[in-house]
Amino acid sequence: MRASARNCENRPCPAGFTLIEMLVALAVAMLLLVLIASITSSSLSLNTLIHGRLLAQQDTKVALDFLERDLDALAPAEKGRTTLTLAHEVVAGPGGANEISSFWIMLLSRPTSSSYPGQIRAVSYRLLLLDPMVPGGSNKRLALYRTELPRTLSGNATAFLDVADLHAGFWKDYWATHAADNGGKTLLDDYLVENIVDTKVTLNYLAPDGTLTSLGLLAGAAVSWTSNGFDGALLATPNTPVSITLTLTSLRPAGVKLYESGAMTLDTAIRQQGVSLSRTFPINPSRLH
């Protein structure tokens, strides 16, 4: 101890940190903390973005899986009768303006002979912005509904097979009654998946001259599949249906909240928060007459 004291007395003792050195060290530490916080924030944002995209893709995949199963169960149309009806429509968004690209898709699954009414099965899909608990209520949600339709019309199990326009003559009227309140039943019973905001339907078929042709279903258009093939105002018949391509666009959770609240327009929501998936459903030519 004495030697150390004498040594310290004979030569300068080690000095402590100066104020400038402390400030420099503090600045470097703060810089490192800011860098770490930035990296962490970026990682969390990326994780949120990826998670939101996966959720949106999952919603779309669920809808496409149901559609694939139902489309695969289609039976061929008998002469003069409709097996499939597709009708495009534009429905109201959060601001009340008609802006959501929706569609009716009505499927009939049954044997080639209608003498077995017990086998008749009808399914309808529709995309709407509604309160599924209380139709007309304020708690509106984007949702795709899948409705198992009744097998009878006015007590006749096969009557709706002979309706000339299934969309106008049966399904649309049924939906109007069902959405209002069908014996205590609400649209929640038909709720399939939410967050889908846009639908596109493309028909792929062989034209009368054998040319492979694709036609997108335009706003307000309706097409049926009958024994003549796809039948609509813009289609030449007879033709041979090849497939139907459905493209569904869903929104990530953040985009859904902004759009449903009216804080984001539809175009912006789709551009910034939309995720689109397409699937092509082939039509077996052997089913056609």
Image: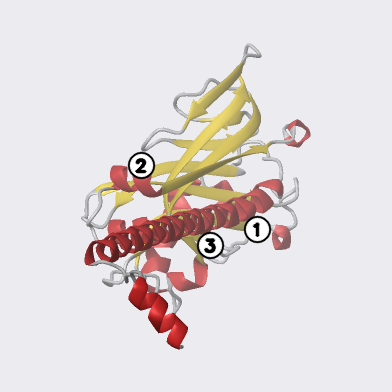
Residue at label 1? 121
Residue at label 2? 271
Q: Are marks 1 and 2 in contact (CB under 8 Å)?
A: no
Question: Does 248 sit left or right of 112 as displayed?
Answer: left
Chain-order first, disc 1 or disc 3: 1
Identify whether 209 is placed above or below 10.
above
Residue at point 67%, 40% (across, down):
77
Q: Are marks 3 and 2 in contact (CB under 8 Å)?
A: no
| Label 1 secondary element | strand
Q: Disc 3 marks which amino acid?
A: Thr
From the top left corner, tell me how far across and down residue 88 is, in percent: 42, 41
From the top left corner, tell me how far across and down residue 217 is, in percent: 45, 33
From the top left corner, tell me how far across and down residue 177 is, in percent: 39, 66
Chain-order first, disc 1 or disc 2: 1
Question: Does 279 sit left or right of 180 as displayed?
Answer: right
Image quarter (top left, top right, bottom left or bottom right) of the C terminus: top right
Chain-order first, disc 3 or disc 2: 3
**Can residue 150 be seen?**
yes
- Residues packed near mark 1 inside 10 Å, few (<14), some (14 to 19) or many (20 plus): some
Identify whether 251 is placed above or below 217.
below
Which is more toward the observer, 240 or 132?
A: 132
Residue at label 3? 147
Q: Disc 1 marks which amino acid?
A: Arg
Question: Does 88 sit left or right of 21 as displayed?
Answer: right
Q: Disc 2 marks which amino acid?
A: Arg
